Amino acid sequence: MVVSLKNCCTVKPAEPTWNGPQPLSELDQVGTTTHVSTIYFYRPTQNWLSPPGTITNTLKESLSKALVPFYPIAGRLCWIGKGRLQINCNAEGVQFFEAESESKLEDFGDFSPCPEYEYLIPSVDYSVPIHEIPLLLVQLTKFKCGGVSLSLLVSHAVVDGPSALHFFSEWARIARGEPIGTSPFHDRRVLRAGDPPRASPCIDHEGFIQPPLLLGKLDSLEERKKKTTVAMLKLTKTQVEKLKKMANEDQSSDLERGYTRYETLAGHIWRCACKARRHGNEQPTALGVCVDSRSRMSAPLPIGYFGNATLDVIATSRAGDLMSKPLSYASSRIREAIKKVNDEFVNSGIDFLKNQPDLTPFQDIHSVGSTQGPFYGNPNLGVVSWLTIPIYGLDFGWGKETYMGPGTHDFDGDSLVLPSRDGDGSLTVALCLQVAHMDDFKKHFYEDI
C-alpha cells in the first residue's frame, strides 16, 4: 500500500492556556511511558467530501479548541532527575499529519492489524530529547474510495485509557458543535503528585519488580529479539458464555460472585500461552493486569480526573498448575491480584515508588527491539481490558466509525480484550506473540472451548 504524506503541521490551543510545570504522579511515570496508538476508519457521507478540505479543517479547528481545556496534551515532557518526569505546559501543540492513499477501505478486509497499518500511523523518534516529542500525534489518511482513517498516538505518561478516551470524545463533541460534556480535572495532587513519600510501603509491590525469566536464562535479551506476529481472535457470545461456565462450574463455595468475562478470558489466554510456549511444569509465569483505581479509593477520584489512575498488578503461577488445573484456578489467581487494589494498596504503591532512588527500571521508555525496560513477553504476558471503556462511537460529525482497534501492536505477550462494536456479546482478543508460538496458541485457544 502506498501512502503519500501531503502535509504536516502543528496544532496549538485556540486560546491562551495556563503555562508552567505540572508534576506527574508516580502512576504516570511507571510502566509504558511511550505512545499508544488507536485507529478509526470512517465512510463519510458525500457532503463531507466536497470541498476536499472539509474534514481536515473540521478536525484541526476542533482539536485546537479541545486543547484549551485539555492543555497538558499540548505541552511537553521533561526529565527532572532520578528517572522522574513532569509536563511542561507550554502550548507547543500537537502534530497533525495529512496523507492520501490510492487504496480503498475494502482492501483492509475485516480490518485486522496488518503491516500496512504502519503507513497510517505516525512514527515517534524516541532518540531525540523527550522535550522535543509531541504528546499527541494525529494522522488523517484519505482513501480513493472516499473513506478515511484517523490514527491517534498519545503519550501514556500523560493519560491512561479512560483519560485518552475522555479527551477524544470531547474533541469529537466540539467537532459536532456541542459543548464539553465533562471537564477534565487536572490536579494530580489527588494522587500525591510532587509530594514526598509519607511512609515506607506497608505492602509487597511485586507488580513493580521485573517479571520472571525463562528457567535457565539470566536475562530476556534472546526472547526480545524474536520475531512477533499479531492475531485478532474472535469469540461469539456463546463461546464467551461457555468459557464463563467452565470457570465457574468448579468455583469454590466461598466465592462471593462468579468470575467476570475478563477474569475468565484472561485466565484462558494465560493457560493457552503456557501450552503454546511449551513451558515445563516448574516454569514461573506472570500475567500483568491493568486495574483502574478511580473507584477503588476510599475517596473516589474526581470525575474527569485527567491522568494515569491505573495500576499494574501481576498474577503469578507455575505453568504446570495453570495447564493441569481447571480454568477456575487461573481465574482465581487473576482475581486475587485484582482484589488487592484498594486505597491502602494504591497509596502504599505510590510510597514504594517515591522511595525509589531512580524510576528508570520501572519504565518502558524505549521502542520495539530495545533491550531495556520491563519485558512482559515469554514466559509472561499482559492482558488489558477495553471492555468498560467507551472505545466506539467516536463521531466528529460525519458519522460513527466503521472500525476501531489498536494500532501498532508489536510486543510479545501484549494482548487486548475488546467488546463487540455491535453490542452482541461477542469479544475480540488482539494478541501479539512470537511467530513460533502463534499457530499453537490459536489451536489451543479454540480447541479448549
Image (spheres, rainbow, N blue to C red):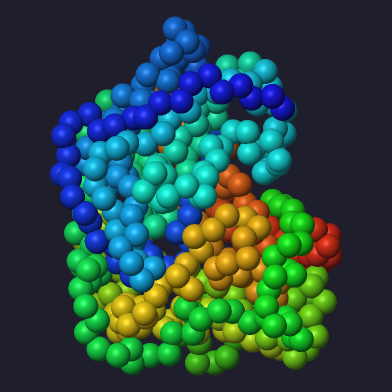
Q: In which quarter of the image is residue 448?
A: bottom right
- In the displayed structure, 295 sits above or below 327; it is above
Frontmost residue, 295 versus 7: 7
- In the displayed structure, 408 sits above or below 205; it is above
At x 37%, y 36%, the residue is 94
Tell me, yes or no, if residue 156 can be seen here: yes
Image label count: 0
Q: In which quarter of the image is the C terminus?
A: bottom right
Q: In which quarter of the image is residue 243?
A: bottom right
Q: Where is residue 132 in the image (x, y as percent from the top left)?
A: 39, 44
- In the displayed structure, 378 sits above or below 151; it is below
Tell me, yes or no, if residue 248 can be seen here: no
Q: Is residue 379 left or right of residue 388?
A: right
Q: Position of residue 34 (x, y in %)?
A: 48, 55
Q: In which quarter of the image is residue 321?
A: bottom right
At x 48%, y 73%, the residue is 361
Q: In this view, does 392 lie to the left or right of 396?
A: right
Frontmost residue, 329 versus 318: 318
- In the displayed structure, 327 sits above or below 448; it is below
Q: Quadrant of the N terminus?
A: top right
Frontmost residue, 280 versus 126: 126
Frontmost residue, 257 versus 181: 181
Q: Position of residue 206 (x, y in %)?
A: 49, 85
Q: Where is residue 133 in the image (x, y as percent from the top left)?
A: 42, 44
Q: In this view, does 364 lie to the left or right of 12?
A: right
At x 45%, y 59%, the residue is 33
At x 41%, y 14%, the residue is 54
